[in-house]
Amino acid sequence: MRDRVSDAREIDTVVFDLGNVLVQWDPYLPFVGRMERADVEAFFAEIDFASFNHRQDAGRPWATARAELVDRFPQHVAALDLYLDHFSDSIAGPVPGSSELVRELIGAGIRVLGLTNWSAETYHLAVPAAPVIGLLEGVLVSGEVGIAKPDPRIFALLAEQFAVEPASTVFTDDAAGNVLAARTAGYVGLQFTGADRLRGDLVALGLPVGPQLTRT
């Protein structure tokens, strides 16, 4: 049986999640100075914001989401409107160190793609917040195709749309469940906990990037 490093020397593609991997995302930021944190937390808890937001990532229009709130949680409609009106505040610039890593991979001739859970209606704000996203060969946006991670269909679509071979492709995401789904689909899955750690993991896999940096 070949070892992990010798397998990885055949890798020709790295696929990045975007949110909190290439671009910082914090859903609380649109409310700063506009709504008390405790009230935001109550809003998120009552509507189960993670699940509610995931449905937009999977293609549901925000207008449909708002209509649901009008019916079920009318007291929170104003908070949702605030979130959407100031959504650009939630994406707070590049994740430290990730842009440099993407550029190194591209410079070394590795294909670099994106796979993101993101609403089609707000995705246009991604590149202005983290310009390195614009350097990717392509990005599969869940909201545009109506399938969101960790649904295995989106990993199959990624392989089909970009003609990648999962076994020779690294996928990195901050969410453990998405990494597990990628591994199940045959990808080399790495959980993202920071650019330095990912750099070290890629070096260990034999990919042509510089050594891990020491930051003070």
Image (cartoon, rainbow, N blue to C red):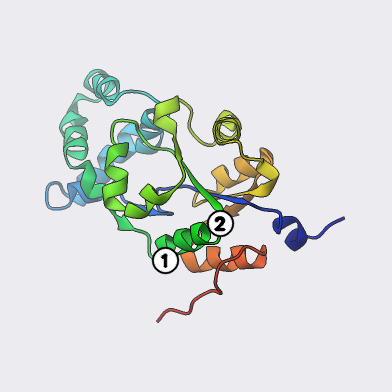
Check residue 109 in the rendering and tell me which mark sits there, or answer none: 2
Going 60% across and 63% down the picture, which residue do you hit?
202
Q: Secondary structure at mark 2?
A: loop
Q: In the figure, residue 185 lies in which quadrant?
A: top right
Above/below status of 73 relative to 197: above
Going 58% across and 35% down the picture, which residue do you hit?
155
Q: Which image quarter is the C terminus in? A: bottom left
Q: CA distance from mark 2 to mark 1?
A: 19 Å
Depth order, front residue of 108/121: 108
The amino acid type found where label 1 is placed reads Gly
Above/below status of 128 relative to 214: above
**Residue most toward the right?**
1
Going 62% across and 67% down the picture, which residue do you hit?
203
Q: How far from the left and from the top, in percent, is residue 176?
A: 55, 49
Q: How far from the left and from the top, in percent, is residue 102?
A: 46, 58
Q: In the figure, residue 43 lies in which quadrant?
A: top left
For label 2, the crowd category at 10 Å Cα-Cα, with few meaning under 14, some 14 to 19 and many 20 or more, is few
Going 43% across and 65% down the picture, which residue do you hit?
100
For label 1, the crowd category at 10 Å Cα-Cα, with few meaning under 14, some 14 to 19 and many 20 or more, is some
**Residue most toward the bottom?**
216
Depth order, front residue of 202/57: 202
Check residue 97 in the rendering and tell me which mark sits there, or answer none: 1
